[in-house]
Amino acid sequence: MRNMIKVFRAMNDLTQDDLAEQLGVSRQTIINIERGNTEPSIKLVLRMARIFNCKVEELFME
């Protein structure tokens, strides 16, 4: 599954640390999600979509 988290972070001027802090996870978790090494929980995906003010489908694609 491909994701656009890095793109949305850049558009919102957020670092990996910033996003991790807002989500209550570690920076390493964000790195692993962006690289596709880890699939985030539904709860985390919904929180990311809320932070970026976008649809889940815009963040993650098959």
Image: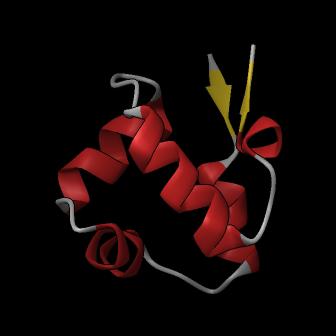
Residue lying at 41% horizontally and 44% vertically, measured from the top left: 43
Q: Which quarter of the figure has residue 37?
A: top left
- Residue 28 image position (x, y, % from top left): 20, 51
**Lateral position of residue 1 relative to residue 25, left or right:** right
Q: Is residue 9 visible?
A: no
Residue lying at 37% horizontally and 33% vertically, measured from the top left: 41
Q: Nearer the viewer, residue 62 or 35?
A: 62
Q: Which quarter of the figure has residue 35?
A: top left
**Lateral position of residue 1 relative to residue 21, left or right:** right
- Residue 39 image position (x, y, % from top left): 40, 24
Q: In the image, is residue 30 above or below residue 17?
A: above
> Which part of the image, by quadrant, shows the N terminus?
top right
> Which part of the image, by quadrant, shows the C terminus?
top right
- Residue 30 image position (x, y, % from top left): 35, 51
Residue extending furthest bottom?
Answer: 13
Q: In the image, is residue 29 above or below residue 10?
A: above
- Residue 6 image position (x, y, % from top left): 60, 56
**Lateral position of residue 37 relative to residue 46, left or right:** left
